[in-house]
Amino acid sequence: MRIDVLTIFPDYLAPLELSLAGKARDRGLIDIRVHDLRDWTRDRHRTVDDTPYGGGAGMVMKPEPWGEAFDTLLDDGDVEGATVVFTTPSGQPFTQAVARELASKGRLIFACGRYEGIDQRVIDEVSTRAEVREISLGDYVLNGGEVAALAITEAVVRLVPGFMGNAASLVEESHTLSDSGASLLEYPVYTKPASWRDREVPPVLLSGDHAAIATWRHDQAVRRTAERRPDLVHGSVLLDDVQVRPAE
Ligand SMILES: NC(=S)c1ccno1
């Protein structure tokens, strides 16, 4: 997978060098390229914003630099299957399901807006040339889209086949789907020592009874989901999975 990031703060994406994404790049699994939007400005001040038509506070990102940047990135022959992601608070919520969708793409191009946003004509024009997704990290406003691009990149890259050394660990993490299709939070996890500050590991986990352990873990995931994320509980589907007993 190739990932391009367009931003006026390229150094903001430096953590991609450090994290697992950096290792994946070293292994040739992903090709990450960060681009400074100002490289497509034409004035000596490298201007990327201007006042909003219709008035109002703040500044809007000018269409010209974005248009020329996308001309470069979408005309480099590597456009097939490219998806352009605008990270914006007005986008669709980013979820694990969206991460799975994006992980199946051949190429992602992140457009990180700043100020009050990017001139709408940029989104409209790019939509005629590639698949466009406007995605929000959450219902809050950041100073720009870079943090969202980092988070989405991390969530997506770890799903790319071959990225995680132990693919099995992807199966039992939060927001995977249960047999009934419900999105479950991960069950609580424990490791040595078996007793710590008079707190014991649940005995079932020491029993060696794999069926009982699987049942306990699923029960815990369902209970945790029902308690913390009732919004993920679709009718009785989730509760049909298991009788949710009151917390012990
Ligand atoms: N919530 C998101 S993705 C965002 C981008 C810029 N500000 O907020």
Image: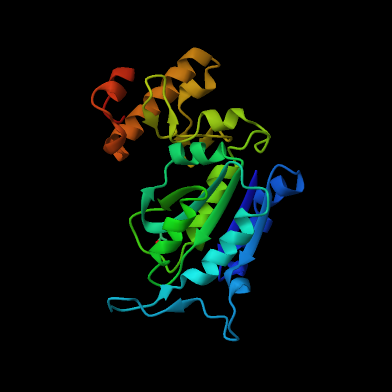
Q: Is residue 244 visible?
A: no
Q: Is residue 128 above or below residue 54?
A: above
Q: Residue furthest left?
A: 235
Q: Nearer the viewer, residue 164 or 68?
A: 68
In-image side of 55 versus 100 (left or right) = left
Tell me the quadrant of the picture where the C terminus can be found: top left
Answer with the quarter of the image where residue 139 lies: bottom left
- Spot occupied by residue 119 in the image (x, y as percentages of width and height): 41, 67
Q: Is residue 38 above or below residue 187?
A: below
Q: Nearer the viewer, residue 198 or 148?
A: 148
Q: Is residue 79 above or below residue 175?
A: below
- Spot occupied by residue 69 in the image (x, y as percentages of width and height): 59, 64
Q: Residue at x 58, y 31 (%)?
A: 169
* Image quarter for ligand 1: bottom left
Q: Nearer the viewer, residue 85 or 22?
A: 85
Q: Residue at x 56, y 34 (%)?
A: 191
- Spot occupied by residue 179 in the image (x, y as percentages of width and height): 41, 19
Q: Is residue 194 visible?
A: yes
Tally of numbered tags: 0
Q: Is residue 81 above or below residue 180?
A: below
Tell me the quadrant of the picture where the N terminus can be found: top right
Q: Residue at x 67, y 57 (%)?
A: 33
Q: How is the image coloured?
A: rainbow
- Spot occupied by residue 57 in the image (x, y as percentages of width and height): 31, 79
Q: Residue furthest bottom?
A: 44
Answer with the quarter of the image where residue 160 lies: top right
